[in-house]
């Protein structure tokens, strides 16, 4: 309803699947400034969806990433226009999301790079190319390092690729669960090493994804890793982002309850 409120009755809106929609703005080819009209609509959509709403007694908000393609500049057939709008949308997401972008030919080059990255990612785990950086967390009162956050990086030759560049691709090709499980195990191993060296009560924080939490054996997997490394559960902090908890809140709560019982 909110989307319909910012477009004309002659325009078309359809749901592609999940949280993706396509909006077709018709009869703009004779307008003096087509791109301004389209970007004005994109701005209106962003503003409209930013307004909070209530669901099951909880106040929530929706963010939006919009990709724009214009006929005939960015394609003369439906498939090309949709594909180019999709590239523009992912460009927005790559830069933090919550906004809009208009397609440009340079995005195709980035798309080719992503295809190459997908191929390499399939073999990254078996080739032992992932490494872990540890960001210290300092207690401001004592000015001592009390814990650390584990951050994954991908080593490609002499280049270190940050997680923001490859994690979305890992999710799309089904590699994210294996990567996340690897992170928990390696973080626990390192945490125990630091404790043995004398850093008493040192803990480690690791990010967890929705797909990882959904594993049927996730709770057992965490328990086994802790047991194998003789690490007390209180020294492992699993950081769960808000978008994860919104997927299936009841499932997430059940998993967290089981983890809390360790």
Image: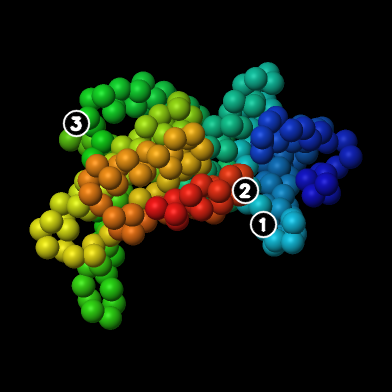
Residue at (74% x, 33% y) in the render = 15
User: Alpha carbon of mark 3 to alpha carbon of mark 1: how far?
Assistant: 42 Å
Q: For residue 199, what is the image quadrant?
A: bottom left
The answer to whether residue 65 is seen in the rendering is no
Residue at (35% x, 50% y) in the render = 206
Bin the neighbour count of mark 3 within 10 Å (Cα to Cα): few under 14, some 14-19, many 20 and up.
few
Q: Nearer the viewer, mark 3 or mark 1?
A: 1
List the residue tagged with mark 1.
61
The answer to whether residue 200 is seen in the rendering is yes
Judge whether 212 appears above or below 151 on screen: above
List the residue tagged with mark 2.
250
Bin the neighbour count of mark 1 within 10 Å (Cα to Cα): few under 14, some 14-19, many 20 and up.
few
User: Alpha carbon of mark 1 to alpha carbon of mark 2: how far?
Assistant: 19 Å
The residue furthest front is 261
On the rendered structure, is 262 left or right of 13? left
Along the line of sight, which residue is nearer the eye, 61 or 95? 61
Instruction: Give the mark, 2 or 3, whose residue is nearer the N terminus.
Output: 3
Instruction: Give the mark, 1 or 2, whose residue is nearer the N terminus.
Output: 1
């Amino acid at each position: 309803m909110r989307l319909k409120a910012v477009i004309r009755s002659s325009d078309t809106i359809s749901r592609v699947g999940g949280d993706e929609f396509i909006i077709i703005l018709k009869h703009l080819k004779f307008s003096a400034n087509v791109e301004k009209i389209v970007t004005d609509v994109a701005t209106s959509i962003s503003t409209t969806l930013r307004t909070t709403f209530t669901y099951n007694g909880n106040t929530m908000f929706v963010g939006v990433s919009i990709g724009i393609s214009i006929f005939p500049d960015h394609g003369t057939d439906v498939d090309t226009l949709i594909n180019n709008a999709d590239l523009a949308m992912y460009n927005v997401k790559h830069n933090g999301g919550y906004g809009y972008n208009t397609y440009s030919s340079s995005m195709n080059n980035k798309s080719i790079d992503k295809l190459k990255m997908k191929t390499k990612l399939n073999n990254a785990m078996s080739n032992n190319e992932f490494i872990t950086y540890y960001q210290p967390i300092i207690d401001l009162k004592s000015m001592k390092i009390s814990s650390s956050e584990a951050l994954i990086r991908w080593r490609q030759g002499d280049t270190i690729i940050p997680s923001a560049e490859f994690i979305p691709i890992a999710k799309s090709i089904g590699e994210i669960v294996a990567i996340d499980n690897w992170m928990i195990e390696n973080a626990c191993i390192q945490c125990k090493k630091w404790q043995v060296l004398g850093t008493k009560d040192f803990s480690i924080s690791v990010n967890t994804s929705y797909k990882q939490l959904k594993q049927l054996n996730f709770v057992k997997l965490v328990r086994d890793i802790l047991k194998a490394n003789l690490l007390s559960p209180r020294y492992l902090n699993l950081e769960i982002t808000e978008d994860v908890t919104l997927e299936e809140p009841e499932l997430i709560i059940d998993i967290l309850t089981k983890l809390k019982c360790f």
